[in-house]
Image: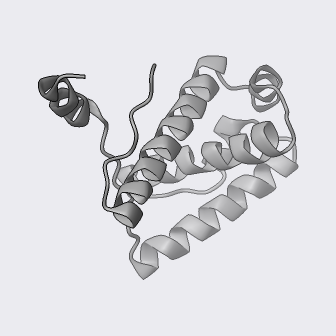
Amino acid sequence: MKKKDKEKKKVDMPEFTFKEFTPEESKVYEEAISKFREAIAAGKNLRQAYESYAIADQKLRSLIQVDFLKILIAERHFAQQQPLEKMARELDASLDLLMDTHARMLQEAGVTAADHFARQTGETPPETND
């Protein structure tokens, strides 16, 4: 691969930053996740679960809701091997939303792993052949 291509590839790699919560935000996060879990366990759909706990800060609410969906996908799809289609039906949620969130999770995991590799070894992660 040419040097320019390598530089371009590095620029194209998405950057992810993970929010560091204040103690107050952490409390809201934990309470919301707990309420969302309770709502899902009680048979509510995803929208109803999100409505079960009010979060005033729109950005924090959005972040917590996305994280909760990632948690559900990790637990049900990855750990219990539940198909995303079944999850979508049970949660009364769009399959596209679950598939997009699933893809984002995989992308974040890959970028995080590459970053971890680079920090541990001081080297650029090996290129893939895709």
Residue furthest toward the left? 4
Residue furthest toward the bottom? 23
User: In the rendered view of the protein, which quadrant contains the N terminus?
Assistant: top left
- The image quadrant of residue 86 is top right
Q: x%, y% of residue 12?
A: 25, 30
55 up-or-down from 95: above or below: below
121 up-or-down from 111: above or below: below
Q: x%, y% of residue 101?
A: 56, 33
Choose between 118 and 15: the one closer to the eye: 118
Please name the colour scheme applied to the rendered image.
one colour
117 sits left or right of 76 in the view: left
- Residue lying at 38% horizontally and 50% vertically, measured from the top left: 58
Q: x%, y% of residue 98?
A: 63, 28
Choose between 113 and 51: the one closer to the eye: 113
- Residue lying at 31% horizontally and 48% vertically, measured from the top left: 124
31 sits left or right of 127 in the view: right
Choose between 53 and 10: the one closer to the eye: 10
Q: x%, y% of residue 17?
A: 34, 54
Choose between 2 and 36: the one closer to the eye: 2
User: In the rendered view of the protein, which quadrant contains the C terminus?
Assistant: top left
- Residue lying at 79% horizontally and 57% vertically, measured from the top left: 38
- Residue lying at 82% horizontally and 29% vertically, measured from the top left: 90
95 up-or-down from 65: above or below: above
